[in-house]
Image (cartoon, coloured by chain):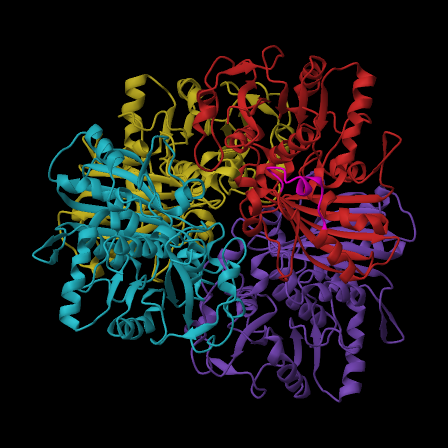
Chain colours: A cyan, B yellow, C purple, D red
Amino acid sequence: MSSRIDVGVLGATGMVGQNFAALLANHPWFQLTWVGASGRSAGKKYGEATSWRLDGSMPESVANLTVNECKPGNVPKLVFSSMDADVATGIEQQFAEAGHIVVSNSKNFRMYDDVPLLVPEVNADHLALIKLQQANRGWKGAIVTNPNCVAVPLAMALAPFKKYGITKFITTSMQAVSGAGYPGVASMDIIGNVIPFIGGEEPKVEEEPLKILGDLVDGKVTYLNAKVSAHCNRVAVVDGHTLTVSVELSQKPTKEQLLEDIRNFRGLPQERNLPSAPPVPLLYMTEDNRPQPRRDISRDGGMTVTMGRLRPCSIFDWKFVTLGHNTIRGAAGAAILNAELMHSEGLL
Amino acid sequence: MSSRIDVGVLGATGMVGQNFAALLANHPWFQLTWVGASGRSAGKKYGEATSWRLDGSMPESVANLTVNECKPGNVPKLVFSSMDADVATGIEQQFAEAGHIVVSNSKNFRMYDDVPLLVPEVNADHLALIKLQQANRGWKGAIVTNPNCVAVPLAMALAPFKKYGITKFITTSMQAVSGAGYPGVASMDIIGNVIPFIGGEEPKVEEEPLKILGDLVDGKVTYLNAKVSAHCNRVAVVDGHTLTVSVELSQKPTKEQLLEDIRNFRGLPQERNLPSAPPVPLLYMTEDNRPQPRRDISRDGGMTVTMGRLRPCSIFDWKFVTLGHNTIRGAAGAAILNAELMHSEGLL
Amino acid sequence: MSSRIDVGVLGATGMVGQNFAALLANHPWFQLTWVGASGRSAGKKYGEATSWRLDGSMPESVANLTVNECKPGNVPKLVFSSMDADVATGIEQQFAEAGHIVVSNSKNFRMYDDVPLLVPEVNADHLALIKLQQANRGWKGAIVTNPNCVAVPLAMALAPFKKYGITKFITTSMQAVSGAGYPGVASMDIIGNVIPFIGGEEPKVEEEPLKILGDLVDGKVTYLNAKVSAHCNRVAVVDGHTLTVSVELSQKPTKEQLLEDIRNFRGLPQERNLPSAPPVPLLYMTEDNRPQPRRDISRDGGMTVTMGRLRPCSIFDWKFVTLGHNTIRGAAGAAILNAELMHSEGLL
Amino acid sequence: MSSRIDVGVLGATGMVGQNFAALLANHPWFQLTWVGASGRSAGKKYGEATSWRLDGSMPESVANLTVNECKPGNVPKLVFSSMDADVATGIEQQFAEAGHIVVSNSKNFRMYDDVPLLVPEVNADHLALIKLQQANRGWKGAIVTNPNCVAVPLAMALAPFKKYGITKFITTSMQAVSGAGYPGVASMDIIGNVIPFIGGEEPKVEEEPLKILGDLVDGKVTYLNAKVSAHCNRVAVVDGHTLTVSVELSQKPTKEQLLEDIRNFRGLPQERNLPSAPPVPLLYMTEDNRPQPRRDISRDGGMTVTMGRLRPCSIFDWKFVTLGHNTIRGAAGAAILNAELMHSEGLL
């Protein structure tokens, strides 16, 4: 294990930071040796600075790390970032300038033309934007991002449809409370209830998939040319965002072709057998009433996106249900898979 | 009170039957004097034959009624029906033949050309189908139906858009467990979960609004000529179906015009001040995160449909959220309002 | 209505304050004309200063009141208080000194020897402590308190047992999230979960009932001489605290005697027909599986305490279940009933 | 793996049967090769006969087994039983007569004097009752049982107190819906609610721990001489029964002694490192608000019982919270650990 790569986490005491700590505790390639948080926590042991909100107990290996301020200097080259949006821009930039590879879950840099917004099974080739980024900005390091927690399963579920020409898609999300961090949604607001609004969510869900599903042409990403509309809702679920999706295609495949495409969908993470890669990234369930968040969200450590109910749509062409684990596949696990992909490309 | 009209309930021991009993207990026009159920319950007191599942206790006035078999003969002229679909056809027909006015919540007769499928604020004029029905079938009585519990708020919310030419609408429902009757949804299936499927629901949601929003032309209903697609889901909510809706229009009103139309939306029930009519049948809420089922479902005894979040849709024209009480406005209360409308028309 | 008594609310924008506003909106005796909150809100309209968290919408009559700072001067004589514990002591004292009757839901003064801790059906005679209080403290006004939201149903349910000599009682509470205010319990902490701890709750549950059930002797309260032990838990319920109770008695009544005592339990509020008094303050339910919070909490506007499952205890004498509405009977409604009692005594 | 012991499951299609199938899928000692169910299912593939209700998907190895009727003959010697109580007596007896070791989760035989009611960490020596059983009944086989799902964590949590002389204990349970099987508790009964009653549960919780904690004297079990009182409730939790417990002791250990006893509590399963044995069978959590079912129930595959909040009780001596996984540690996992214990004793 001594040959594992040292890694750090920026924003380590928050909810996504805790997920990084949990997922990295037994990682075969990466070893969490550095944790950064706000000045308030700096100098304390991670175990003292952090109110652990995940199931089970905090891994002992991380509990004893001393929390640092989020400044470069004596920090591992590879850092994961789960900083709050209001501070992420400055700090991530500072680390990239200082030569760090910043693999970020924050939204701040996602939509820049020279920043990869990655789902490794879908658009691993977008990593090439790093060159553009370094040229543009004069950085030795780089920033690589993963998408919003709804955009990940949405883009993955739509990926097999791409070759038939996606022209429109509309989605309604039923999102878990863990997506709001901690304390997040008040229990009085959600027990036996639905909240038909999540601040700032719909624009992300409408924009990010178009970049992810875009093509790399001459070193730049051409967005998918499709219209998108999203309705985002909060429901009384702990983990797992469920989406209904209707999609219009320019070509007209049969249901059998689509099911075959979905079932055969694989990417570089599967080819290269990356440590966090689920064997079947897009699992199609044949039961009428699946996928369901509580029952299906934890497959392969939360990295599998599930789908079901593919059927004709009387307005567009097809409609279906898809589900992804928002804090794993849609946050910390997504970033770790991005880093694994980069390592497999020799970029670390 | 001695001048109240005697009424009966077919299928009185089930969940919708219990809602009829609760809503009729203090009704100013109708007096529940007759309850019918399966042979198994016949002869018992209603209070013994029925496991009361609603909040609070069973009204004493109904507890002491003796349960009858569902056969005509010494039954009030006006009967509400909440029979199971597998027996409703024969029994409702038998009562209509025998001269009863059957105001039914069952789905069996909803889509026949000569049966009114009513939302009194929207298509009260469809009551004229009764003449056709009696002519066609040689009945002295009649069957009048109310729509499915999702179709009611959907049709009401779309009614103000109708004058602008509705061409397409797509909806995702998040439906309460009370819609499945009792015991209905198993708690193991829904705590902390979403079930993305409700058997037989999507076709009803896609078809019924087109009849409700249709025009009466030459004594027959011409369906609304629109494409509809529905995604139906069950969520951990007790009462109240929440819908996201996107709608395409042939004309292009401004948001202000639409809001004014929604806010001014009234119908015969309001004009005539029917006992169960909510003063504002379609209440538009301006808060970003409303309506919410647990907080908004009980307005005006559950008869108000609430709306919110009207905003442009990047695929169609407009999108919004709407919410209706599935066992009141979408079932027993709907039928009672239908009967009140008929009484105000002199049809009882 | 012009003859209603003007009242104010200290801490009007918080959760209990909102309950005061809702319950006073149509009160036959009291008219809410003054609202006080922190300096941050002062000067704003109540409707702007307050995020309304209750079902339905804010009453318009209160929405237009201007929020004041919590200082005496041009304030109605009768003020309800739902101040946070960290500021209640000073402010309530200041108002009492200035001649106000402070009817408080805050815990700060509950356990003082010269402050009534009232459940009007149980210990209305403790109001006599006001004289002692005014003598001790030189106040023209007075402070009167209601108990903790668990102590209310516990004391009411035990009241009929008192004449048989209560020597020990042990209780486990399953408490609603609304008891924690807003935002209170995080949804991630309670969906599909139980939290077996509520900070500061068990001592209150163990102490307050002994004062409430105590006897007024020579103008002072002699506490009930019983041992008490409490286990307090939070469950995924919106409103309503459910308690299991085992109780030891020095005398040995039969079950029939106890049931008769419970069913006949009435107090001054019923005798005098006070506006908020439930006709049957302690409703015994005979069904095996009742009372249940969601189904039974709203009887008589939330002022009825329900009981059930009275049966022998193999360790003590009897065990049972009881349930009370924590924000109504256990907070704002309790205080209003206290004020009604005082009015009926000519103390306002 | 070819050397694994063949085992069968009686009642394999029910909820506990499904848990047996899941837990045995990768068991190092036992191989599930035979499944029995009612005549209705016999002859079908297990995968067709069974509606899978657990998280994830049915193990493929069991899906292809053919379901048999529950009759001896060509059945493995070791059979686990999760039969319904109304048929378990006859069938389990028939198998024991025919020489099978029946390791049963059913309640039918638990309280017979010659049937072990085992928690392997607590009373492994009670296995000696098998000799008495075989002598009494002339069986070549035997029946061994595990306790009710509340009795298991209750007995385990009390085991470290036993040496100080347990004289009384009182418990209130907050039980998960999975304890009621499928469909079990209706969602309308439990969303946002508590049901203060579980049919037939309290007597089991009051009796079984006294046998489990009893001493084997001269080949027979002398029950623990303590008074017990239980209050059983259903709450909106999927898995995991949480108990509050107050206990009276004849000796007076310090809190430090008790905590040391709890932390050092181990049994034969740990000594012998049985496959399903958790390393720490009774995990004491020091956080104020733990254990919590959703967060702590899955430790060590659901076999760890957790405790917390040990503090003085003002009526008895000590009070605390304990939690166990009802379908694993309180049902299928318990039976499998019993079988492992028997194997380690050379009894299979």
Quadrant occupied by the C terminus of chain C: bottom right
Quadrant assignment, res C308: top right
Report the front residue among A70 and C47.
A70
Quadrant assignment, res A335: bottom left
- In the image, taking residue B50 as reference, residue B106 lies left or right, namely left
- In the image, taking residue A112 as reference, residue D106 lies left or right, namely right
Q: From this viewpoint, is residue B211 visible? A: no
> Residue B76: x and y, percent?
50, 26
Quadrant occupied by the N terminus of chain C: bottom right
Decide: is A261 above or below A14. above
Q: Which residues are magenta?
A: D265-277
Q: Residue at x 18, y 62 (%)?
A: A130
Is residue D273 in the magenta section? yes
Decide: is B6 above or below C136. above
Is residue D255 in the magenta section? no
Report the front residue among B166 and B94.
B166
> Residue D84: x and y, percent?
63, 24
> Residue A148: x and y, percent?
30, 57
Report the front residue among D124 and B60.
D124
The residue furthest top is D73
The residue furthest right is C251
Q: Residue at x 51, y 74 (%)?
A: A44
Q: Residue at x 39, y 68 (%)?
A: A11
Decide: is B259 above or below B219. below
Quadrant assignment, res C155: bottom right
Q: From this viewpoint, is residue A336 visible? A: yes
Main secondary structure type of the part rendered in magenta: loop
